[in-house]
Image: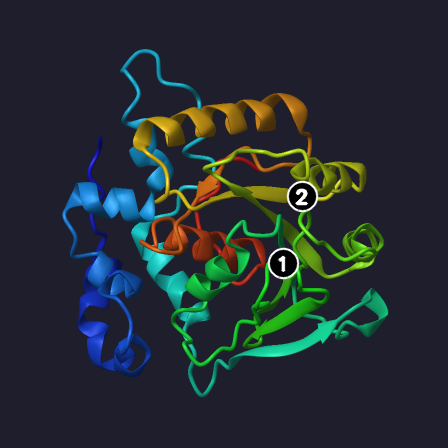
Amino acid sequence: MAAHRLRPGVCRLFAMGPELGSARRAYSAFQAFTEVLRLPSKQLTKLVFPLQELHGHFVPGSRPDLHLNIFHPSLEDIARAESFFTASARNRIEYLTAAVRLDHAPDLRHPEVCFIGRSNVGKSSLIKALFSLAPEVEVRVSKKPGHTKKINFYKVGKYFTLADMPGYGYRAPEDFVDMVETYLKERKNLMRTFLLVDSVLGIQKADNIAIEMCEEFALPYVMVLTKIDKSSKGHLLKQVLQIQKFVDTKTQGCFPQLFPVSAVTYSGIHLLRCFIADITGNLKTNGFQFS
């Protein structure tokens, strides 16, 4: 596996410690990208590019096409993306409001992304991990699975908003389909839908509801595989192959590349932040290898 060499711009980031000091206190060194850059090459790849690390476990000559390089930004691009998720006086990251219907949602001109997934898929944990550079952000979590009945909106400075949809499946709101369908069809500033799939369980019947809605409305969406720290390597590889085959053969609007993540180890979190910053138009990278 090729090592990721640091470009001059990345090397300069090592001198940014004092500027990032207030944002870096109180959380793991793995959450601060300046610390990630100091990791040995194999550890860095596993943390930042987990799909590439998984690909390396297949036998050479029989490795499947996991579309590794469709979005493959430089380390410098990923480091720059961290600034959008770092709270500061000039970049307020905060819980905005909740809405039970689209006409209750905030009327914002910022680009918006939404996160959708089954109850217990790890959606709240993932959003907390994405916002770990802004630890004051209150991520709304239901005390009991399936009890979230509203769409929660988070504002990320002047850059974009993130909509956290109610979980589907177990004890989903009775009007879940109508609520989410209306949002997906009519939300004009929605740039991308992130559909979370439990990497331990794979795509479940309930997930097909969300997939069918995205496909029916011709919406661009991405599959994020959560909880990759919960499976053995063999089981995870099997699930990745099955989900990749599903994306390649059963979908039209799904982004070809999968995004495996762990809210526990932070594997894949930095890459996902970079992807969000890019597709919302805030960070122009050279990471996309197709138009």
Q: Is residue 84 above or below residue 45?
A: below
Residue 220 image label: 2
190 with respect to 68 (left or right): right
Amino acid carrying label 1: it is Val
- By what rule are the colours in the image chosen? rainbow
Q: Is residue 165 above or below residue 84?
A: above
Few, some or many residues within 10 Å of mark 1 (<14, 14–19, 20+): many
Few, some or many residues within 10 Å of mark 2 (<14, 14–19, 20+): some
Q: Is residue 266 above or below residue 134?
A: above
> Would you identify the image quadrant in which residue 167 lies?
bottom right
Going 67% across and 49% down the picture, which residue do you hit?
170
Q: Nearer the viewer, residue 146 or 263?
A: 146
Query: Could you tell me which quadrant the C terminus lies in?
Result: top right
Measuring from the top left, give residue 216's x and y in whole percent. Answer: 80, 37
Residue position for label 1? 113
Residue lying at the far top of the rendered structure: 61
Secondary structure, mark 2, is: loop
120 with respect to 260 (left or right): right
Measuring from the top left, give residue 21's x and y in whole percent. Answer: 25, 80
Secondary structure, mark 1, is: strand
Going 37% across and 36% down the picture, which residue do you hit?
51
